[in-house]
Image (cartoon, helix red, strand yellow):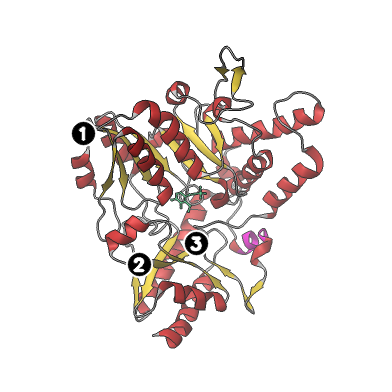
Amino acid sequence: ATPAILAKAFDVQSVRNDFPILHQEVNGQPLVYLDNAATTQKPNAVIDAISDYYRNINSNVHRGAHSLSDRATEAFEGARETVAEFVNSPKKAQIIWTRGTTEAINLVAHSWGRSNIGAGDKMLVSTLEHHSNIVPWQMLAEEKGASVVPIPISSAGDIDLVAFDALLDATVKMVSVGHVSNALGTVNPIEYIVASAKNVGAKVFVDGAQAVAHFPVDVQSLGCDFYGFSGHKLFGPTGIGVLWGKEELLNAMPPYHGGGEMIESCSFAGTSYNTLPYKFEAGTPDIAGAIGLAAAINYLNQFDRGAIAQHEQDLLVYCHLLAEKCKGLKRVGEAKNIAGVFSFLLDGAHPSDVGMLLDQQGVAVRTGHHCAQPLMEALHIPGTVRASFSIYNTREDVDRLFSALEKVKSFLV
Ligand code: PMP
């Protein structure tokens, strides 16, 4: 059966019923959760899958010692298969479990980076990046005598592609960019970036932390070399994430962590390493996390992804409409293509005060630099207030945000 036939009609009220945490009061008001870029809430299907694993299956994987271990291994490897299909990986061995996006980037910076970056080489990252897509490259640059060069952005928050192309030459070995900016919501033109980077032989890492929950991702059609994301921003548990990489690159890379599972044989005379993906998975993995993440992907897969994207775009359009009518509100980030994020400032009010007063009215947002200090520096602002949307948000949530903002203004402005 094709997904189109299986797809459930997208009904936001019934989706909300799948997320138990949403049905509570915070500070005496029904919760409006608009901090989805930080982490998403979990549907019953995920909570139940984790609980079922610990109640009925818990055992260590790949030991093959007994039946329970076989069941745990089957569920764990089945989860890898689910992720492989989710991003359209040619092989499931190209799916490496990590703790999240941060660890996926660190793995590549350490393993690929240490053997492929030398003195004088450059790594390009955009000015939009989260610290986790800057600092690992800076650490590598420091060790190797290489440099990290920022790709400029426009005042609207789009990557300046002309400036990007001008930065490319044979000394550029890695281009690492976010698929979607966590601070502004900008959706970056990955295919263009990949095509340009390939012209000079640079590899491309795509930080998909903010993309995978909003629209389908196909690593083959993007053409990138590596793609990383976190389970917890995709309705899955914390502590689990994914690195996808091209097979020939992963095969050529040395291990990241040493330990159990990642060896083929170990002796004091010398140790040989396991094949993909186990070479990169030393130690007992987050088995429950992987199973929980697969449950999250299966949950998402019941819906027509296009309908979800449309629902979230509708919320953004509605939000922008109300923003225009809200005196003293200034949007931050007006890129051509935005997913899930509404960043703004209120004249005369500090973002953290706005956030605190919204919280008192039951509206959860994030304030500050959003782990993107270089971006805030480039925009000459200390931070923003960020409302970020997910499948379970409604127009009523947007109404609540703006009526709460009117109250905030009456206190602060
Ligand atoms: N990149 C982006 C764009 C993010 O939004 C985040 C999380 N805020 C990360 C990387 C890091 O993800 P994690 O903390 O789950 O490793």
Q: Is residue 32 left or right of residue 341?
A: right
In contact (CB < 8 Å): disc 3 and disc 1 = no
**Callout 2: helix, strand or loop?**
loop
Mark 1 to mark 2: distance in Å? 34 Å
Circle 1: residue type: Asp
Does residue 17 appear in this view?
no
Q: Which residue: 57% across, 16% down? A: 271
Q: CA distance from mark 2 to mark 3?
A: 23 Å
Q: Report which residue position mark 3 lands on.
A: 389
Residue for badge 2: 382
Q: Which residue is mark 1?
A: 169
Q: Position of residue 256 (x, y in %)?
A: 50, 30
The one nearer the camera, 365 or 135, is: 135
Q: Residue at x 47, y 22 (%)?
A: 251
Q: Secondary structure at mark 3?
A: loop
Q: Which residues are magenta?
A: 13-19
Is residue 406 shown left or right of residue 148?
Answer: right
Mark 2 or mark 3: name the one nearer the start of the chain: 2
Q: Reading the chain from its start, which is encountered first: label 3 or label 1?
A: 1
Residue placed most toward the observer, 154 or 85: 154
Which residue does the image show at 54% across and 52% down from the upper left?
Answer: 233
Q: From the viewer's perspective, is the residue at label 2 or at label 3 nearer?
A: 2
Instruction: For residue 294, say whether it is visible.
Output: yes
Q: Residue furthest top?
A: 269
Q: Does the closest atom of ligand 1 sit within 8 Å of the Cβ of label 1?
A: no
Q: Amino acid at mark 3?
A: Phe
Question: Residue 288: x percent and y percent?
Answer: 69, 42
User: What's the magenta bit mostly, secondary-structure-wise?
Assistant: helix
